[in-house]
Image (cartoon, helix red, strand yellow):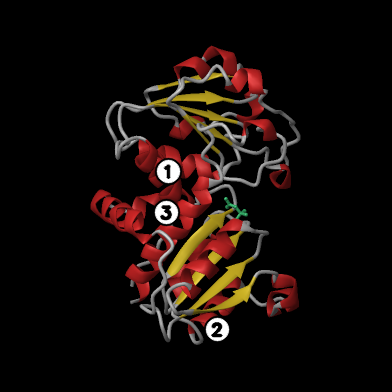
Amino acid sequence: MQHLLSVDDMKESFIFDLWSKASDQKDGFSDVLKNKILTNLFYEPSTRTSSSFYSAMVRQGGSVIPINNVKFSSAIKGESLEDTIITMGTMSDCIVLRHPEIGSVDKAAKVSSVPIINAGDGEGEHPTQTLLDGFTIYYNHKKNIDNLRITMVGDLKNGRTVKSLVKLLSRYSGNYFNFVSPKDLRFPQDSIPKKSFETDKIENVIADTDVLYVTRVQTERGSDHEYSLSTEQLNLLPKNSIVMHPLPRVNEIPRDFDNDPRAKYFDQMIYGLWCRMVLLEGIMS
Ligand code: CP
């Protein structure tokens, strides 16, 4: 059984094979997942991840049991995560799980009779977001994800997407990280890559950036900062750089930047669909 709980579960050959197939996926429909059922089990809100998995399943002929609001499931009556996983394993071929606690996906995997895909465990990881984030860089940087200057901005303490993406990009040679955040939202010091620089001022690094990865302040995890980049600051980026954001956006990037050719944050969602189509086919077909 192939669970996908962490970026550590994905070997390089698996990732490049998936990206290579994702490039060919485009808007294709097929029936490779006919007679397969996915459970979307979300204990935290989601627009993109849950809908992207839903669409990836339906586009390949499969079906989805959507439990997007556990308030209307037996979790509200006190059912444990483990019992819910065992239950949904009797009715489906794979479970996509989002949960507010780090490690919840490991608990789920221990009792599950079907593969578990981590769709975000608290401030832990979000490996399928990393698949699509890495693909965005690969696709827009001539199939190259090394020797890049990556600037990550925002709530680097609580944001799970930055942690997973740093894990992935640290595997490749020559990548250098700039971490831009208020002091109390710094990237976890025990995981900080050797080749990195920390600052609270974007102006110190923005002109030396190939990939700008912007994140939202995670108010749901107790952060109370507000920040936004200005168009003037974003225009300091090199012409061939790219701007990414896992979304949802609050006010971090001004809307008047959305049509700039460097803005890739809406494209990321399309890439996510392609990557998840390939992933689900690989796991279930
Ligand atoms: N990027 C992401 O995880 O978005 P959702 O919270 O909408 O799923």
Can residue 254 be spotted in the picture? no
Crowding at dot 2, Cα within 10 Å, few <14 / some 14-19 / many 20+, comes out as few
Type of amino acid at the residue the image marks with label 1 = Thr
Q: Nearer the viewer, mark 1 or mark 3?
A: 1
Give the quarter of the image for residue 252.
top right
* Closer-to-camera residue (146/34): 34
Q: Nearer the viewer, mark 2 or mark 1?
A: 1
- The total of numbered circles placed on residues is 3
- Residue where numbered disc 3 is placed: 6
* Closer-to-camera residue (186/217): 217
Rendered image: mark on residue 82: none
Q: Is residue 272 left or right of residue 77?
A: left
Q: Is residue 221 above or below residue 263?
A: below
Q: SS of the residue at dot 3? A: loop
* Closer-to-camera residue (127/187): 127
x, y (%) of residue 147?
31, 26
Ranked by sequence position, the earlier of labels 2 and 1 is: 2
Q: Is residue 153 above or below residue 85?
A: above
- Residue where numbered disc 1 is placed: 136
Crowding at dot 3, Cα within 10 Å, few <14 / some 14-19 / many 20+, comes out as many
Q: Is residue 151 left or right of residue 223?
A: left
Q: Do the CB atoms of the residues marked 1 and 3 lie less than 8 Å apart?
A: no
Q: Do the CB atoms of the residues marked 3 and 2 lie less than 8 Å apart?
A: no
x, y (%) of residue 129?
48, 51
Q: SS of the residue at dot 1? A: helix
- Residue where numbered disc 2 is placed: 87
For the residues marked 1 and 3, what is the alpha-carbon distance in whole angstroms?
19 Å
For the residues marked 3 and 2, what is the alpha-carbon distance in whole angstroms?
23 Å
* Closer-to-camera residue (53/105): 53
Type of amino acid at the residue the image marks with label 2 = Thr
Crowding at dot 1, Cα within 10 Å, few <14 / some 14-19 / many 20+, comes out as many
